[in-house]
Structure formats: C-alpha cells, structure tokens
C-alpha cells in the first residue's frame, strides 16, 4: 500500500521564546490510499492543529510532512509549501460557502482558480454534484438548502478537483443528532465508493468508530494509541484510551494478588478476578464498560451485590444505577426491562474487568 500522507516527528508551538506553548509534541502518522483515519481526542489535544498543519494553515517548528512523494514541509531544510500548492480537499466545520454564489458556482470556484476551461468545469461540477445527490440543486443558493445539503456542497467543493487526500474538520458537528447519524452513513459510503483517502478530526468517539478504518487518539499533543476502531475499543492500552473510547464504571478496588495479566481484587468486601491491561502496577485503577455488567437477581460468580438506586429509560433499554450508601460504591448497568427496587448481583466478567 502507498502512503498518501506521511507525518514524521511533527512539533508545533504557539508563541515563541520563553512563552512558547507546545501543541504538537513529536506526532508521527501515515494515511494509506483508500484509508479513512480519524483524529480523535479531547479539546486542546492538538487534533485540529495537526490537520491545519497538514493543510498548510499552521506552521510547524520541526518534522516533515509528505503528500504522496512530494515533501510539503521539512523543518530541517526550512521548507514550507504554501497551502494552495498542496492540492488537498478541505471541508471546514462551518462549511464556509459563499452566500452570494449558487451551488454550482461554489463548487466550481476552485476549478476557476486553476484556470480550467468552462466546458471542463461544467462536466466536473455536474459529475461531483450527481455523485453527491445534489444535481437538482445546482442553481440554488446556500440559504435555500438544509444543513445536510450545505454540508454535501462543502464536500463536493473539496472533491471536485480529485485531490489525493481530503481533510475534514468536525464535518458533522453542525448537524442535529438525527441528521448526524444519516450523514455519518452517507459520508462513510461516499468515501468507500470513491476510494478516497481521508483524514477527519472529531471529538465524538462514536463518529470516529463508525466512519474510520483507523483511529489516532491524541492526548496533550501526543498520540496516546492508534489502531482499528475495534482494537481501540476492545483492547485499550491505557486508562485514558479506555475512558475516552467508551462509557465506563470506575470501581474502588484493592489489588490483592497479581500474576501476570491475572489480578485478584477486593471490591466492596467481595473477591473478584480481573485482567491487567497496559503497564499496570500497584493499586491500579479498575474499570468496566457499562454494557459488560450483567445484572442478576440471584447470586453469581465474580459479582458484587448492590441495591438499586434508580432506572432511566433510554428508548432501547434502561440505564440502572446501583449504589451502596455505606461504602459509596456506585455502578451503572443496562437492562432490557425496568428493574424493581431491591438488591441485585452485578456480574463483572474477569476478562472485561480491567486494571490499569
């Protein structure tokens, strides 16, 4: 597989001298042809800065950026290719459409700058609008479109000159929840159908998992972990990854015994078997995903007994909260049905009860 984008040891600061604030601290990544990589992380982790550095909208301090075989930034050689020469497709969070231009004119704008002939422009724009289901809207203005249609126009404008890489900055954040789910499926299908290579910034882990082939999780300017959505969710290497990638219970546990990955814990007076993840060591933090907790009315193995505090209806299930008032131990679990008040056994499967 060829790399469409390669970033090596990228450093970027805001400000200079003693007041410099490091944003990227030696980030390395690659994007292969036909691959979708999501840059995921909390606010301030450096994901948008990394995307903007690739686009040529931010100036790094050190490292290299290559698009295909072309080096577009080399800190050691003090070389930086201007943004307009990088030939990348950009989709901004705000869509950034010209309000006074029609859909056709918005999409054609980049081709006009590239001095293409009128007939070439017409063919290319018609083709990309058809691909995105926008053909019938060519003569409309942005204010006459829905949010989802405006988003597709922004994508059409990024795709029209067939860039090697498309960069998406929080492309779905302006849409309401229902439309986001539809747009997520549409965007994934489009990227696969057109064989695009895409780098997408998001802070929403469900969105990253749904759309991408690979996730790069950034934490404080460094890559915390990277891998397929499934590996990131099911086998996190660090507590940060585990907590960012899913909905978890943190448990007050005492490590009684440790033998390699096998850990024996004491939680709320009960002895439980658990699995060590990452480097571990000492009285590690213990977590379990909410969906892995199994609720039982009768005693079961590897479980703790807690009284039910409340159940919340979520549509497809109930989220139930259990709490032991004496110790303050709380645990959330899902149930298909509303539970009656009382005490329940909460089974914590040992391979899903993680100690970091």
Image (cartoon, rainbow, N blue to C red):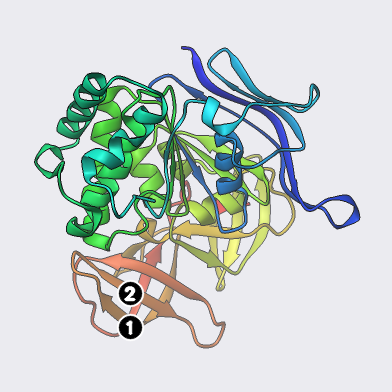
Res. 161 in view: yes
Left or right for 230, reference 295 = right
Q: Quadrant of residue 109?
A: top left
Left or right for 241, reference 214 = right
Q: Residue furthest toward the bottom?
A: 325
Q: Confirm or deny contact between disc 2 and disc 1 (CB under 8 A).
A: yes
Residue 257 pos. (x, y %): 67, 53
Residue 220 pos. (x, y %): 67, 52
From the viewer's perspective, is residue 310 above or below residue 1? below
Q: Which residue is mark 1?
A: 310
In the rendered structure, which disc, 2 or 1, sits on the residue that comes first in sequence?
1
Residue 139 pos. (x, y %): 15, 44
From the viewer's perspective, is residue 263 above or below residue 57? below
Considering the numbered disc 1 on the image, is that residue within a helix, a strand or a loop?
strand
**In terms of depth relative to the viewer, which is nearer, 109 or 157?**
109
Q: Which residue is mark 2?
A: 320
Left or right for 126, reference 240 = left
**In terms of depth relative to the viewer, which is nearer, 165 or 180?**
165
Residue 92 pos. (x, y %): 42, 48
Q: Quadrant of residue 147?
A: bottom left
Considering the numbered disc 2 on the image, is that residue within a helix, a strand or a loop?
strand
């Amino acid at each position: 597989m060829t790399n469409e984008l390669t970033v090596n040891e990228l450093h970027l600061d805001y400000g200079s001298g003693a007041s410099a604030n490091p944003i990227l601290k030696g980030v390395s990544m690659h994007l292969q042809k036909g691959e979708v990589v999501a840059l995921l992380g909390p606010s301030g982790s450096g994901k948008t800065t990394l995307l903007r550095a690739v686009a040529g909208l931010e100036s790094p301090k050190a490292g290299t950026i290559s698009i295909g075989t072309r080096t577009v930034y080399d800190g050691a050689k003090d070389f930086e290719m201007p943004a307009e020469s990088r030939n990348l497709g950009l989709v901004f969070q705000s869509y950034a459409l010209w309000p006074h231009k029609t859909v056709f004119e918005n999409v054609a704008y980049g081709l006009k700058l590239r001095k293409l002939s009128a007939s070439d422009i017409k063919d290319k724009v018609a083709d990309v609008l058809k691909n995105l289901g926008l053909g019938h809207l060519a003569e409309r203005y942005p204010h006459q479109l829905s949010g989802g249609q405006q988003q597709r126009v922004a994508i059409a404008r990024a795709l029209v000159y067939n860039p090697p890489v498309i960069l998406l900055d929080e492309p779905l954040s302006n849409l309401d929840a229902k439309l986001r789910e539809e747009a997520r499926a549409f965007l994934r299908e489009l990227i696969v159908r057109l064989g695009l290579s895409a780098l997408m910034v998001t802070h929403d882990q469900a969105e990253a998992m749904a759309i991408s082939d690979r996730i790069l999780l950034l934490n404080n300017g460094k890559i915390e972990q990277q891998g397929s959505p499934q590996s990131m969710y099911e086998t996190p290497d660090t507590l940060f990854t585990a907590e960012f990638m899913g909905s978890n219970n943190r448990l007050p546990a005492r490590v009684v015994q440790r033998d390699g990955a096998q850990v024996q814990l004491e939680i709320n007076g009960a002895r439980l078997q658990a699995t060590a993840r990452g480097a571990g060591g000492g009285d590690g933090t213990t977590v379990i995903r909410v969906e892995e907790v199994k609720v039982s009315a009768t005693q079961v193995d590897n479980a703790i007994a807690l009284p039910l505090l409340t159940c919340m209806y979520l549509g497809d299930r109930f989220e139930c909260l259990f709490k032991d008032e004496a110790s303050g131990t709380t645990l959330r679990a899902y149930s298909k049905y509303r539970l009656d008040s009382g005490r329940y056994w909460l089974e914590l499967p040992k391979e899903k009860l993680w100690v970091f």
